[in-house]
Structures are given as structure tokens and as C-alpha cells.
Amino acid sequence: MSRTSPADQSRASAFPEDAVPGAGAEEKAEEVLREHDISSRFRTELGWWGWLVGAISIAFTLYHLYAAFFRPYNAWMHGSLHVAGALALIFLLYPASKRLLRPDPNGNMWVNLLIGRHRGIPWYDVLLAAAATTCSLYIFFRYEYLVSNQVAILGYSDIDILIASLGVVLVLEATRRCVGIPIVVVAGVAILYALFATGDRMPGDWGHRGQDWSEFATNMFLSAGQGIFGTPIRVSSEFIFLFLFFAVVLLRTNIGQFFNDLAFRAAGRFSGGPAKAAVAASGLQGMVSGSSVANTVASGSFTIPIMKRAGFKPHVAAATEATASTGGQLVPPIMGAAAFIMAQNVEGIEYNDLIVIAIIPALLYFTGAFLSVHFEAKRNELKGIAPELLPSWKSIVTRIDMLLPLVVIIGTLLGGASPMRAALFGIGTALGISLLRALVEHLLPVISEATTQGKSPVAETGKMALALVYVVMQMLIAGARTALPVIAACASAGLVAGTVTSTGLGGQLGRGLVDLAGGNFMLVLVMVMVACIILGMGLPTTANYVVTATVAAPILINHFDVPHIAAHMFVFFFGILADVTPPVCLAAFAGAGIAGANPMRAGVTATRIAIAGFLIPYAFILEPALLLQGTFAETLIPLLTVILGMICVASGLAGYLIARGTVTDRILLVVGGIMLIYPDVVISGIGLAVVAVGVVIQAVLRARGHKANTDAGESLDMDIPTASATR
């Protein structure tokens, strides 16, 4: 199997050739991605096994496309095929330890073969792949038996219990390999609670009636609609996979580089332009990507060197890219693949409605990030990129057709079509545009040249057709591989959600947290925020949302009557922000690896740049109109005060509004800005007065010469970095 390098997108850039990171930058980006993104630590030296893995991957993707058109099986049977294929590929692609990816030329050949440290796939992973596939296919082939009265009356057989037990264990091991240990630990704690936290062993109301292993395993693996085959896997098999494949098709058409060029053309010439362009580009790429770390590396391998050359300190460049890439998971229509599950969890909200509701929170997040880098640039007197060094509008207009698949998919959704149909339309449009571009840009010139030289155009056309078939095959393979971590995360998150539901743990946690906070609403919000961030430090977006939506969101809904959509967006936001929150800020660490910066310093700076993301959830909890849960007039005033508050907070933290600030005016701006964000007329009014005092102080400082040299028309005559500058 082949894989597109994170920096591959840069090759189609409209920048000068020396602007594109070279091979050294690509290797570094790949190294950083594997270091910080567990889902990228898969085998690449497969030998002849690559043919088998490639064939399974192609069949896996084609099956999902077929199922989307014809829906041949019910949700449980379809889910079993979904999990079966994913587990097989995970065990074939992901080693038991990342150390096994590194060759050991000095080791004993037979020992290397035994432990699987060699080219190809070790024998034990082949057995595990076969066992995992068998367990999932057991549901498919024994469906009639599993839903029969025989099971309902007589219970499960020993074979059923063995299959279920093995299935649960293999799902957890597959998740550990491609997602990481933290989610397995969370699932393990849930399992221990289900097995041992009985009423006679736990204090107060924290116990439950108890379950033995056979009951737990069969409930989690052999019961439709709960556990491993609950809502997360059902949504993953029906919607998420198609949208992830849609993202793969778009990125293979270099839409990522188109977003980069568009953002740099629009914002690159202004003060701090490279950072502003990075924020915009990552926000656009977030529409089709679902991983903050992967997005940080893919975009950052291009944007971070440019930001450093523009004068941004390495840790600031890393933090900016990490903040923007993390926010990409908040951008509809994909939203880190969690949007589809959220639409199932929130009463009265369809997916088509959700992607509209999510627009304001996403725009506020990126507005806050944009403001933070703007004031950072102003304080440090950083200019933009000279216009002649930017991509031309002509080069962008000639590629504007790349946006058509996004227009089609969003328009189809807003028109009332199902997410599945919208994804299919988007995929078809993207493939059609790719085929048309290949015809115009490659095939017609080849035919013309062949005719001129007296060669057979049929032969040249055949070669081009084979090349196109190869490209499509690579897309199918990449679509399957991209989905594997999401499928594993959804399966393990289903274990946690199933345990919480079957034991009543969610209600007990809610009562305990409310009692601990003394019933104080704001204190409960802070506690829920901390819990979501802690969970988010080890769980990917989809799994984190499933867990927090099962455990934390009901606390706000049941005890404080928070609207369902507001509660779910609150936990969703803070689970994602874990990627830029120290000490485990993976996106910031990945950015620091590219920038050559101190990782923890980059994480702290990313938290400052993303400060709006920490304030916005409180705003829409207190004022649900920001989530379109009200009239236009009810939404407009809170929206304006939130934006004004974000300007004040960002400038106060950066230390510049209209002049270099002092400690006093910076504190006034931050405090007043937070009060403005609080949706209460009296508090916002007081905040406005506090901000006014801070602005007056800065105006006096400016009059005394404490302003930076930020003349609007100037730009930095800088060379876009060459390959050597990125190392």
C-alpha cells in the first residue's frame, strides 16, 4: 500500500518552486507525524503481503459504496461486515509495538521472524486478523439464530460466549494499536466497573446489581444496538466512512494546496500575513479532514517555515498552526467525524440542521485565533509577504472547480437529502472533476503529441487509462486505511457507552458531580470542562465525544435544563481543545517538532491563541441563541458582544491593541473582555466600561510613542523558504 506524504499536497502549489518544502521537509513531516499520531504508525514494508492488504482495502471501500446505494443488509449485519474488515486490516497493518517497525539488521533472522520484526506481516498478526474477522462474521452468518427465540429463552451457548469474549478482547487490542492506550484504559475501567462495582462493594449509591463476564461480553458483542455494535459503529458504517472517503478523494486532487494558495493570496500580504493565512487554510482544510495532528503536520510542513521566515518565533508558529488545525475539527460538515454521532444523540436535531448550527461556533473560534495572531504580529511589528511572491489570482481561478464537490455536498445536505446520499454525490463530483482535469491537462496533450510524432494515440490513451485506474485504486486503498482508527475508536467507545447505560453510571456521576459543586451551575460547568479536556488528552475526537456525550452532557441536561444541543456542543468543544491544552497537547507537540520549538512552550502559546475556544462554549451554554436557538434579534446582540469581548481578550493577552500594553491595561482588557462575552446586559455593560479604561490607557501610551511601526501599506520582502530553510 502506498500513502500520500503530508507534504505531497505542496507540490501543486502556485508558489514559486523554491517555496515548496523539499524531500528533507517531507521526511521530517513524516517522522513528526509518526511520532505524535499513533494512527500513522502502520507498516509500509509489506512485501507480497501488500497485494493482499491492497485487495482487502479495495474490497472494503467498494463494499461501503455498494451498500450506500443498495443497502443490502440491516444495520447490525452491515455493522458486522464493517468491523470485520476494519479489524482484519488493523492487525495486518499495525504492529503490536512501534519498535517492530524499525529493522534490526544485527539481530538473529529467526528471532526477528518470530517476533515479527521483518519485512511483511508476522504470522501471529495473520492469525489475529483471521480470528477478529471470524468473530465479527459470526454475527453476519448467525444473525437469524442470534435474534431467535432460542437465544431469548435458553440464553447464549458456550460458543457464543467464547466468540463474544474473543471479540471484545480483539477490539480493544486493535484499538490500542491504531488509536492508543488511553482509550483502552478508559474502556478497561468501564469493564472493571461493570464486573466488580456491585452494590455491596461500593459506598453510597455508586454500585449496581453486578454482571458476570459472560453476561457483559454477550451484551457488548452479541446484542444489536448496544455495546460495540451500538450507535457509534452504526453511524460509522453508514455515514462516517463515506465522508472520510470523500475527504481522501478531495485531498488526492490537491484541494489542500488549493486552500493554502487561496488563504495566502487573500491574507498573506497583511501584517502577520503568513500566520493569518495558516489559520484560514487550516480552517478550510478542516472541512474535509478529521485529525488535528495530521492536519498540523500536513499544513504545518508548508506554513510553519513561512511563518518563521516572516519573523514569528518558532513556538508561536507551531502554536498558530496547531490552534488552527485543531479548530478544523469544529468546522462542518465533517467536524472530526463526530457530527454524525451528535445528530443521533441530540433530540430534535437532524444532521442537516447540525451543520448549520455549528457554523457560528466554528466562525467564532477562527475569529479568535485570527485576532490572536493579528495582535501578536502588531506587537512584534511583523509585516506580510510581498504580493509578487504570492500565488496569483489567475492560478487560483483556474482551479476554482476544486470547490465544486464541497458546494455539491453542502448544497445537497441543506436541500434535505440524507448524509449518505450527499456523500455519494460529493464523491461522484470529485471523481468526475478529477477525470475531467486528467483528460484536459494530460490526456489531450499526450494524444496531440502522439499524433504529431506518428505514434498510435490508442496506445498512449491506454497507458493514460491504466494510470487513472491506478490512481483510483490508490484512493480506494487510502479510503479504507484512513477509516481504520475511527472505526476502532467507535467500537471501543461503544463499550464505554454501553457500560454507562447498562449500569446506570451516568446518573450516579451526575448526582455526585452536582453534590460536589454544591449545586453551583458555573462550578459544574468548569468541572465538566476539566473532565472533557482530560478525556480528550488520550481519546480521538469521535471516541471522546461518545464518552463525554454519554457521561457529561446528561449532567447539564438533567440537572440544569441546558438545551440538548448546547450541552453536546459544550462537551464536544472541550474534548477537541485537549489537543492544544498542556500537558498533553499533541497538535502543539507535532507543530513544535516541525518548527524546532520547545513543545511545552508551544502548547502554552497555543492555549493563549485558542483562548476564544475556551470562552465560546460558556457563551452558548448561557445564551443558546448563539446556536440558532432563537430569533435573529436574540442572536445578533450576544454575537456582537462576544466578538467585541474576543477582541479585547486577544489583544490583552497579546499585549497590543493600539499600542504596546502595560500590565494594567492588559488586565483591564482581558477582564473586561470576559465580562463582555458573558451574555448578561448588566455584566456586559460593566465590562464595556472596564475595557474603555484599558483603551484610554493604551491611547495615552500611543500618544507618548509606545506604538509599533505598523504602517498599513508595508510588506515584508521575504523569500518563501526553500527546502533547506525548513530543516
Image (cartoon, helix red, strand yellow):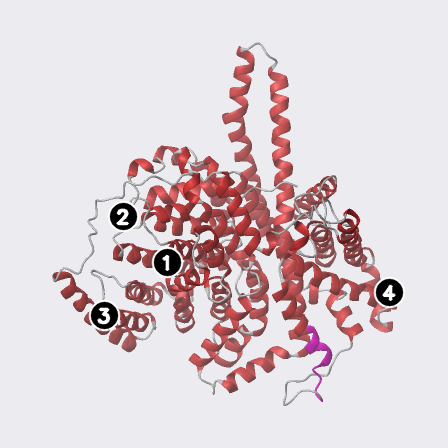
Q: Callout 3 environment at 10 Å: few (<14), some (14 to 19), or many (20+)?
A: many
Please name the residue that numbered disc 4 is placed on.
Answer: 159
Q: Callout 2 environment at 10 Å: few (<14), some (14 to 19), or many (20+)?
A: many
**Where is residue 646, by image quadrant?**
bottom left
Q: Residue at x 47, y 48 (%)?
A: 285
Foreground: 115 or 232?
115
Numbered mark located on residue 383 in the image: 2
Q: Nearer the viewer, mark 4 or mark 1?
A: 1
Relative vertical location of residue 129 with respect to residue 387 in this rendering, above or below:
below
Q: Exactly how many numbered labels are in the figure?
A: 4
Determine the secondary structure under disc 4: helix
Q: Are marks 2 and 4 in contact (CB under 8 Å)?
A: no
Lateral position of residue 566 relative to residue 246, left or right: left
Determine the secondary structure under disc 3: helix
x, y (%) of residue 312? 34, 52
Determine the secondary structure under disc 2: loop
Q: Nearer the viewer, mark 1 or mark 3?
A: 3
Magenta segment, prevailing SS (helix, strand or loop):
helix
Q: Are marks 3 and 2 in contact (CB under 8 Å)?
A: no
Determine the secondary structure under disc 1: helix
How far is mark 1 from mark 2, CA to CA? Answer: 18 Å
x, y (%) of residue 30? 54, 47
Foreground: 228 or 94?
94
Question: Which tag, 3 or 2, sits closer to the chain's start?
Answer: 2
Q: Amino acid at mark 3?
A: Asp
Q: Callout 4 environment at 10 Å: few (<14), some (14 to 19), or many (20+)?
A: few
Q: Nearer the viewer, mark 4 or mark 3?
A: 3
